[in-house]
């Protein structure tokens, strides 16, 4: 089976205004990487518009209607950071629908795994509020859709975007059927993502935050995956793995302070692929979140696709045990063996 992608020129129809970092050129960088791709053949899954009922799997009626009304606005702002135009609503529906189509293709084994290169991004959008460049929470909608359509009882979302995915966390904060794990710069926008935020009620323990100080690079991220994330994922045993793949933790990104390189993204993908192979029959789909340096977007896309197309390569977690995550281990110890 092949790796599949979702890419569509209509994702460039969402215009955010001159100087805005979340701009259509981001997708042009991805398209250039795909045009020059010389690796294994990729299957293209066509995007479609998500239906209103699908958006409401993760969002309130009020949010859906507020974003729908932007169809009549040439240019407007949802908040200080989040801009829309008259095509933004349709583009956001296309982003969510494209991810749903790819999820279905992987769930039914039509393809092996995949990456949805969509915009606008989604992980900051809460059930009732668009924010942080995000209109609808694509990955949250996908998780609910996979549960409803395919009957999955356990879904994991791993978020390596520079910023904490406050929206995804909030949507699943009391839900034990979705494990949310975030690696992010902290303290930083949006101000959430503390190590002690581990869920609520039935969802206690199913929210795992791995906050990093600025300056962490490939080694720190790989250690977090090997020592914390992979063990938790294996114990949770998800039936499907979703990845919120933001490339703004790249060392070249203008919005961040991290030092991840293409080798770091490749290593994280390799570890997650092996976990997915071991516990989820290889079912893994990544979706684009942030990433605002155009060259870094292109080269990071190539790195992740190179790993996805090779599939799990028998990566074994390291046997070393560092003290870098002792505080996190203490917080997680009532819930997980780490």
Image (cartoon, rainbow, N blue to C red):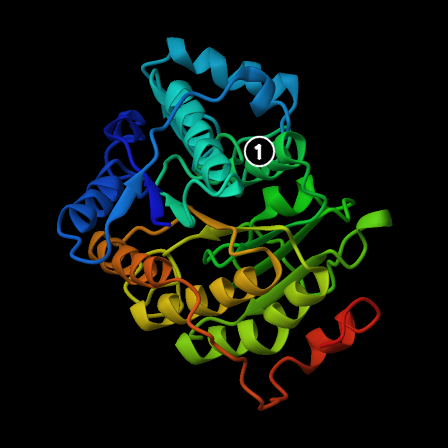
Q: Quadrant of residue 158?
A: bottom right
Q: Position of residue 36 (x, y in %)?
A: 13, 51
- Name which residue lies at 62% across and 89% down: 321
Q: Quadrant of residue 252?
A: bottom left
Q: Position of residue 150 (x, y in %)?
A: 63, 35
Q: Is 277 drawn above or below residue 106 in the view shown? A: below
Which quadrant of the figure contains the C terminus?
Answer: bottom right
Q: Position of residue 69 (x, y in %)?
A: 47, 11
* Residue at the extreme top of the image, as rendered: 72
- Name which residue lies at 81% across and 66% down: 335
- Name which residue lies at 74% across and 56% down: 206
Q: Is 253 drawn above or below residue 23 in the view shown? A: below
Q: Is residue 165 visible?
A: yes
- Given residues 57 and 114, the one toward you in this image is 114
Residue that mark 1 sits on: 141
Left or right, 142 with respect to 11, comes to: right
- Given residues 42 and 156, the one toward you in this image is 42
Q: Is residue 187 visible?
A: no
* Residue at the extreme left of the image, as rendered: 36
Q: Position of residue 267 (x, y in %)?
A: 40, 71
- Given residues 164 and 182, the one toward you in this image is 182
- Name which residue lies at 32% across and 30% down: 16
Question: What secondary structure is found at the residue carrying circle 1?
Answer: helix
Q: Quadrant of residue 305?
A: bottom left
Q: Residues within 10 Å of mark 1 (few under 14, many from 20)?
A: many
Q: Is 40 drawn above or below residue 317 in the view shown? A: above
Left or right, 242 with respect to 249, comes to: right
- Given residues 128 and 312, the one toward you in this image is 312
Q: Is 283 drawn above or below residue 315 in the view shown? A: above
């Amino acid at each position: 089976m092949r790796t599949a992608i979702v890419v569509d020129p209509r994702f460039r129809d969402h215009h955010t205004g001159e100087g805005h970092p979340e701009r259509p050129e981001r997708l042009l960088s991805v398209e250039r990487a795909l045009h020059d791709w010389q690796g294994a053949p990729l299957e293209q899954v066509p995007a479609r518009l998500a239906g209103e009922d699908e958006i409401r799997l993760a969002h309130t009626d009020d949010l859906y209607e507020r974003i729908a009304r932007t169809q009549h606005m040439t240019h407007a702002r949802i908040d200080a950071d989040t801009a829309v135009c008259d095509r933004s609503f349709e583009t956001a529906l296309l982003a969510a629908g494209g991810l749903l189509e790819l999820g279905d293709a992987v769930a039914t084994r039509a393809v092996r795994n995949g990456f949805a290169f969509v915009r606008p991004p989604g992980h900051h959008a809460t059930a009732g509020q668009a924010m942080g460049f995000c209109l609808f929470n694509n990955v949250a909608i996908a998780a609910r859709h996979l549960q409803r359509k395919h009957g999955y009882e356990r879904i994991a979302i791993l978020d390596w975007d520079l910023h904490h995915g406050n929206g995804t966390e909030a949507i699943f904060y009391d839900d034990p059927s979705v494990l949310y794990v975030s690696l992010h710069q902290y303290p930083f926008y949006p101000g959430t993502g503390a190590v002690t935020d581990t869920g609520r009620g039935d969802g206690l323990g199913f929210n795992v935050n791995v906050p990093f100080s600025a300056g962490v690079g490939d080694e720190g991220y790989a250690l977090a995956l090997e020592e914390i994330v992979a063990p938790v994922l294996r114990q949770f045993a998800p039936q499907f793995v979703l990845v919120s793949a933001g490339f703004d933790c790249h060392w070249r990104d203008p919005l961040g302070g991290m030092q991840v390189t293409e080798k770091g993204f490749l290593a994280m993908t390799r570890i997650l692929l092996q976990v997915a192979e071991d516990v989820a029959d290889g079912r893994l789909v990544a979706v684009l979140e942030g990433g605002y340096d155009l060259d870094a977007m292109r080269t990071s896309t190539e790195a992740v696709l190179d790993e996805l197309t090779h599939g799990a390569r028998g990566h074994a977690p390291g046997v070393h045990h560092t003290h870098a995550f002792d505080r996190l281990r203490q917080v997680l110890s009532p819930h997980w063996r780490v």
